[in-house]
Amino acid sequence: MMKKQLIMEKAIELFAKQGFEATSVQQITEHCGISKGAFYLSFKSKDELIFALVDHFMIQFTSDIDYLVRNVASDQNLLYEFYYAIFNSFQKHSDFGKILIKEQSRSFDEEFIIKMRYYDRLMEKTILSMVERLYEEKEVRDTKYDLVFCIKGFMSMYSQLFLFYNVPLDLKLLSQSLVEKTNLLARNTTVPFITKDLIQMFDEPLGEEVTKEQILEIIQQELVEMEESIEQESLILLKQELLAPTLPRAIVKGLVENIRNHPQTKWISYLLRNYFMV
Amino acid sequence: MMKKQLIMEKAIELFAKQGFEATSVQQITEHCGISKGAFYLSFKSKDELIFALVDHFMIQFTSDIDYLVRNVASDQNLLYEFYYAIFNSFQKHSDFGKILIKEQSRSFDEEFIIKMRYYDRLMEKTILSMVERLYEEKEVRDTKYDLVFCIKGFMSMYSQLFLFYNVPLDLKLLSQSLVEKTNLLARNTTVPFITKDLIQMFDEPLGEEVTKEQILEIIQQELVEMEESIEQESLILLKQELLAPTLPRAIVKGLVENIRNHPQTKWISYLLRNYFMV
DNA sequence: TTGACAATTGACCGGTTAGTCAGTATTATA
DNA sequence: TATAATACTGACTAACCGGTCAATTGTCAA
């Protein structure tokens, strides 16, 4: 399974430079120092690779930001921390960001569009919960969907600076600047455009919640590939808890926290956080 | 030359659905009901087709918006008219809009990137001049570049609604909503991020102005393909004026106005408006 | 009706691609 | 060390691509 990692890392570099279509499997394998056949031992097809890449990064990105929004204690700093984390992530994974922008060309690929829309809506959900936490209900009741839209607009607009110019940017100033803009819009907007009705017109309800069985399956799949570690032990305990709840909430929360920083289990941590509501 | 038109129209449909790379010349010609060879009578290559498409639409879009910003009399309405025109155009040409978004995947194609960056900067210039006209210099001196960025962000964010959902949207309300947001940001922002210095770091000076000779060449090229009309007569007079200025400004302005609404001469009208400064 | 010219066709070419598979090398096991 | 299982290789295939050009069809003046 180490090969999978290697291929993904090398493929990102090439995709970012040349785009997905323009990069051949041959090029990737040469860049990895392996044969073409070896590629197909790790991935069933070239498409499976790009999907794996998208999942790998979007899962990390989405669950990191969600964790942050749930766990920054001070309302005062939340918005700042949010923007900072977003752009820090864009900066760190700029190669993947480039791929994401380029591969909007795949927007005719049904599977791809559904996948992206799914992560997009998870992010929207997170932003919305942040907005609802930060501002008075009466203040933003009618305008909060516009606000979410504007925040996403700021994110996408300013992140282009990271992706297309290799200029070192002052993340702190940028975050401050966007905090001010967001607060201005949140506290003074009176003419909303995106109403709840409008949202519902193009948002079919977010696919039914992930079920216990699905989570168990993901856990099982992950367990077979893990070596002995705190994460593995935590995951086993969480699996038992999922089958038959016995542990106190505090312990469950701690276990979920244990697996939060491992890339392979981050997603499970996110799913369990939602499932156990800890 | 009628074939060219036909190919461009049919190609847009296919590109919007499938993307540029994924659409073969064969598919295009089949969709047009012509042979593959006939395609190469109108365009030297597949690339030349996409460049022609980009030029055709971006020229119209850019010069229409620029004309509007220069000619809406009332400052009161300008911003509203601006947004309305933008989204109206996105709605009308949503197929081309989709191509534009998808073909950011061509960002490794040097020629393409330069072309797009050129139109992007023309648009930025227009927006900046609007901002400078609408707001007090002392109010937006330090924040106007951020403001331009935010306006572009609003444009790109909300235009996605037109491109990805076939929902009839209330353009008037949307424009009003964005006017309010823009005014809020313009009048209250105190923490700028994009400074003039930063702009200059990634904006090499906008390519030297188009010269008189270049304009003459474009006019000449256009004249040979034109049938007798007011536009043709105006263009001939403007050509003479360019070679030896004799006419009063009012007449020049009128002649430039005459050729503004013809798709083929719109760009010339834009260039001459800048050249004669009328 | 003829013949010269222009417009149009589609089989064809060289090149590239994703994906396969028979065979080879490596490792683990007994 | 012998055997079995696994990991890996790279030549090969079938399909498709953009682009060409000899052959065919259409047009119109004489």
Image (tube, coloured by chain):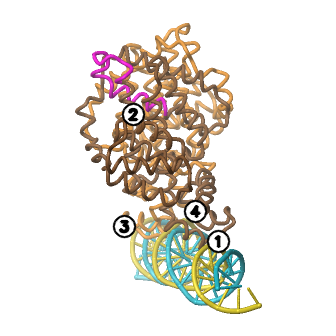
Chain colours: A orange, B brown, C yellow, D cyan
State the extent of the magenta-drawn residues as a range.
B132-155
| Camera-nearest residue between A90 and B86 | B86
| Camera-nearest residue between B167 and A174 | B167
Residues indicated by labels 1 and 4 sit on the same polypeptide chain = yes
Q: Counting other residues with Cα less than 10 Å from the Cα at mark 1, is it few (<14), some (14-19), or many (20 or more)?
A: few
Main SS class of the magenta portion in the image: helix
| Camera-nearest residue between A96 and C12 | C12
Q: Position of residue B180 (x, y in %)?
A: 48, 17
Q: Position of residue A167 (x, y in %)?
A: 26, 40
Residue B1 has which mark? Answer: 4
Q: Is residue A88 above or below residue D14?
A: above
Task: Identify the subunit bearing mark 1.
Answer: B
Query: Pointer 1: what residue?
Result: B35
Residue A33 has which mark? Answer: 3
Q: Secondary structure at mark 4?
A: loop
Task: Identify the subunit bearing mark 3.
Answer: A
All told, the count of numbered labels is: 4
The amino acid on which the numbered mark 3 sits, given as a three-letter code, is Gly
Residue A195 has which mark? Answer: none
State the CA–CA distance, disc 2 to disc 3.
50 Å
State the CA–CA distance, disc 4 to disc 3.
51 Å
Q: Residue at x 41, y 14 (%)?
A: A75
Q: Position of residue A229 (x, y in %)?
A: 42, 41
Query: Pointer 2: what residue?
Result: B126
State the CA–CA distance, disc 2 to disc 1.
42 Å
Q: Secondary structure at mark 3?
A: loop
